[in-house]
């Protein structure tokens, strides 16, 4: 068989593979799956910033410049879509050809990840209230406590059967007008003892409108790292996670308060 004919057959056979069998592509110079996988495991804002800089920063700068020149009001999504719709679409990866089904609660159902039993004091949803900046250059333990940025809202859900969901919300201040994403990573919790736990990520999704159109972006083929922490409960409603190592980076979460039900009107 001639080399040229063999090459043609190979190209045809690859094109015939189903979408799930082909590895996900990341388009250079736009925001997409690679960024969302990276963001999904972040807790501090510095980490999110770094993830968003990888091939995404310039695209978002062009988009924000467009909406600025169009003089669109902050809450005017119609103006942004009309004036900068094409620029927005060029800033993000195209939507997947096969729509992903939304996993509304990954820790429920037969396919929910199961790790080690989680102590009752850890069970619940925790909202990030403060994070530290590690001194990476010096490797020192001294750190500066900072308030988390409101445009990177983060929460950690832990269930009794050892499942977790780490959620980061990216709003339009980060992604541009008409785009907001709820980036989630989930997997197994391994509670090793009364001071140590690990989060083993195995899946995730980025959900929300991109350029005004709803999307569910699968992150299952991403390269997740997971993380190990020491933990401590302070005053029952405060969870402190610390990364082992020279920097001792620390994250403080507050237990999410359940809203009291509205009183029923008297007959």
Image (spheres, grey):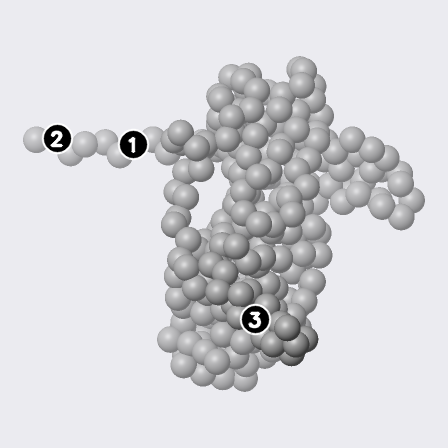
Labels 3, 1: front one: 3
**Of the image marks 2 and 1, the number of the one nearer the N terminus:** 1
Q: Which residue is mark 2?
A: 266
**Of the image marks 3 and 2, the number of the one nearer the N terminus:** 3
Q: Is residue 134 left or right of residue 165?
A: right
Residue at image location 41% in from the left, 38% down from the top:
105
Image quarter of the C terminus: top left
Characterize the local packing of mark 2: few (<14), some (14-19) or many (20 or more) Cα atoms within 10 angstroms.
Answer: few
The answer to whether residue 237 is above or below residue 21 is: above
* Cα distance in 3D space between marks 2 and 1: 15 Å
Res. 166 visible in picture: no
Res. 4 visible in picture: yes
Q: Is residue 212 left or right of residue 265?
A: right
Characterize the local packing of mark 3: few (<14), some (14-19) or many (20 or more) Cα atoms within 10 angstroms.
Answer: few
Q: Which residue is mark 1?
A: 261
* Cα distance in 3D space between marks 3 and 2: 75 Å
Residue that protrudes farthest toward the front in the picture? 1
As drawn, the label of residue 9 is: 3
Residue that protrudes farthest toward the left in the picture? 267
Q: Are marks 3 and 1 in contact (CB under 8 Å)?
A: no
The image position of residue 259, as x and y in percent, is 37, 33
The foreground one among 173 and 106 is 106
- Secondary element type, mark 1: loop
The image position of residue 254, as x and y in percent, is 56, 32
Q: Quadrant of residue 65?
A: bottom right
- Secondary element type, mark 3: helix
The image position of residue 18, as x and y in percent, is 47, 59
The answer to whether residue 129 is above or below residue 22 is: above
Residue at image location 48% in from the left, 21% down from the top:
160
Residue that protrudes farthest toward the right in the picture? 138
Residue at image location 89% in from the left, 48% down from the top:
137
């Amino acid at each position: 068989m001639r080399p040229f004919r063999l090459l043609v057959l190979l190209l045809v056979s690859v094109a015939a593979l189903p979408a799930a069998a082909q590895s996900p592509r990341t388009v250079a110079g736009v925001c997409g799956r690679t960024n969302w996988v990276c963001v999904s495991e972040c807790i501090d804002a510095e980490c999110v910033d770094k993830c968003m800089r990888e091939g995404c920063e310039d695209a978002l700068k062009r988009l924000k410049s467009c909406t600025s020149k169009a003089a669109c009001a902050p809450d005017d999504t119609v103006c942004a879509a009309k004036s900068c719709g094409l620029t927005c679409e060029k800033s993000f990866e195209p939507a997947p050809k096969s729509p992903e089904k939304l996993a509304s609660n990954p820790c429920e159902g037969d396919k929910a990840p199961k790790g080690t039993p989680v102590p009752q004091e850890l069970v619940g949803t925790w909202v990030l209230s403060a994070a530290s900046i590690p001194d990476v250059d010096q490797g020192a333990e001294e750190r500066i406590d900072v308030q988390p940025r409101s445009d990177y809202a983060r929460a950690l859900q832990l269930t009794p059967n050892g499942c977790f969901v780490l959620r980061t919300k990216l709003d339009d201040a980060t992604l541009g007008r008409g785009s907001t994403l709820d980036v989630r990573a989930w997997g197994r919790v391994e509670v090793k003892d009364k001071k140590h736990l690990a989060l083993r990520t195995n899946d995730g999704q980025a959900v929300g409108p991109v350029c005004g159109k709803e999307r569910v972006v699968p992150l299952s083929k991403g390269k997740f790292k997971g993380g190990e922490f020491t933990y401590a409960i302070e005053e029952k409603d405060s969870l402190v996670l610390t990364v082992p190592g020279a920097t001792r980076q620390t994250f403080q979460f507050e237990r999410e308060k359940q809203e009291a039900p509205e009183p029923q009107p008297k007959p």
